[in-house]
Image (spheres, rainbow, N blue to C red):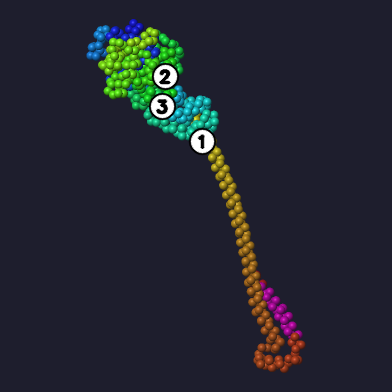
Amino acid sequence: MYINGNLYIAQGADGPIHLTGRMCNRHGLIAGATGTGKTVSLQVLAETFSQAGVPCFMADMKGDLSGISQAGKMSSFIEKRKEDFGIPSPEFKACPTRFYDVFGEQGFPMRTTVSAMGPQLLSRLMELSEVQSGVLNIVFRIADDKQLLLIDLKDLRLMLDFVGQNAGLFTTAYGNISSASIGAIQRALLAIESEGGDRFFGEPAFDVNDLIATENGMGVMSVLAADKLMLNPKLYSTFLLWLMTELYAALPEVGDQDLPKLVFFFDEAHMLFDNTSKAMVDKLEQVIRLIRSKGVGIYFISQSPSDIPDAILGQLGNRIQHALRAYTPKDQKAVRVAAQSFRANPKFSTEDAIMELGTGEALVSVLDEKGAPTVVQRANMLFPLSQIGAVTEGQRLDVQNAAPDHIKEYASFFDRESAYEVLLAQKQREDADAAEMLRQKEEEKRQKDAERQRKQEEKEAEQLRKQKERESREKSRGSSMWKRTIFGTLIGAVLGSVGRHVGNEVGKTITGGSSRSTSSRKTASARKTSKSTSAGSILGSAAKTAATTATRRVTNEILKNIFK
């Protein structure tokens, strides 16, 4: 409750307890077991800052903090305690509120780009090894050098594919890029997408300057619906860590002011440090140490101070410790650690008081005007003036509809040209060129095959022509031989027949007829042998000549008839 310039948050045995405005950017801690009142204390601090004109950002783990957007009302709890605080007639009022949701379901989307998230936070989100993280750094560097925008996860996925396929081109300039590391990062991206983390990356990207806003003199409460986000602790913690680093990068140096420019509440803070590398913790410590000069106060909410690394715990000057239970040795150690983090009060044992606190009670220590922690006091926390508990869906929609137009623009979505579109177009051109080269090669092959086929057909045609000519010659030669053979046979037969006929005729002429008996011819021949030897020779020669002439004449006549 902001009264007369004082941030009134609790009532102790010695009177009201106030936060010192100039020291609120020195950060703080709200700790305590489940059910001891941490959420109510967070709401009290947030609405007190709002009344003072200081905007706040808070993660709403269970939906309870959404009630800060509605005016509270009297209850038996408040009725009982209002007299203790000296507030007989509390003025219930709502805080100007804007609802956000990484998934865009219960508020305006809060997106960022892959480039803005950076390789270090992405490595943490994807739980990459040191080698894989190094490869991711190389991929980001190559994208920067080639002026390729990494906006959403599809940009990063295609960029990884591009670098993996061309690793040989980049190894000399950027370092070794193993296909195994590229594959591991791709699998991690798929895991993020399956958990809905891909909706966190895109445009329009959230401008952290929109967290610093006031309405009617009150600081605007930016409430992040985190009930679904909590199911992915890595995404939740990485998102809030990104938001802090963005604030540090975006805001100018202002030093210590009368009031901070923004107060950032980080609920379930142990998630930020679980399984976190020392390098990341060192970075977070640096951000927390330096961001206060930007006028930003960071308040962690966790069950025990032991959830916070000592280097960071030492920077949390304003502390509210609710009850802790010491059921186990580990719990007892946590109680001792919590007690030792306070400046002791000689009036009571801090360690014993932590275990005795009731709901709504707390041990409180704040920084004074000089920045020194005050002695711890046992106090009752102030009750909220806004509604305790979740709003209805209708109330949430009313708050959304009342948001300024530039905030409503986050509900839209656009996908401008980035690495995905550039690399996809390049790949399509390369595929088209490859397809054209393949087409040309296939055309050349087709032409060569056609030419080879043509030559083969010409060769076969020539062979067929030659074969036909050969067969024609052989047929012609065979016919000639057949004719000659028939001719010779006929001539032989004719000559034989003619010869015999002529011989018989000549013989008849010489011997005087064929009616004589053989024995008579022999007798006559014997008697005349000696007398007719020379005459016989002359007659034989004449007979041969006559026979040859007659044969030739008959043969010619026969051939004329055959070859007409």
User: x%, y% of residue 50?
Assistant: 35, 12
Single out the residue that lies furthest toward the top.
Answer: 4
Residue placed at 70% from the left, 86% from the top? 509
Estimate the spatial distance between the alpha carbons at disc 3 and disc 1, rounded to whole Å. 34 Å
CB-based contact (under 8 Å), mark 1 and mark 2: no
Q: Which residue is drawn at the image coordinates 72% and 83% (left, top)?
A: 543
**Which label's residue is closer to the chain start, 1 or 2?**
2
Residue occupying image coordinates x 69% and y 85%: 507
Q: Decide which of 327, 208 is in the foreground and name it.
A: 327
Q: Which residue is disc 2 drawn over?
A: 285
Magenta-drawn stretch, dominant element (helix, strand or loop): helix
Q: Nearer the viewer, mark 2 or mark 3?
A: 2
The amino acid on which the numbered mark 1 sits, given as a three-letter code, is: Asp
Which residues, given as a range, are shown in magenta?
Answer: 538-559
Q: Which residue in the structure is indicated by mark 1?
A: 431
Whichever of labels 3 and 1 marks the residue nearer the N terminus, that label is: 3
Which SS class for mark 3? helix
> Is residue 455 rendered to the left or right of residue 523?
left
- Closer to the camera: disc 1 or disc 2? 2
Q: What residue lies at 71% left-to-right and 87% top-to-bottom?
A: 510
x and y percentages locating residue 176 in the rendered image: 51, 31
Q: At label 3, which amino acid type do we have?
A: Leu
| Amino acid type, callout 2 | Glu
Q: Nearer the viewer, residue 239 or 162?
A: 239
Give the label on residue 125, or none: 3
Q: Is residue 142 visible?
A: yes
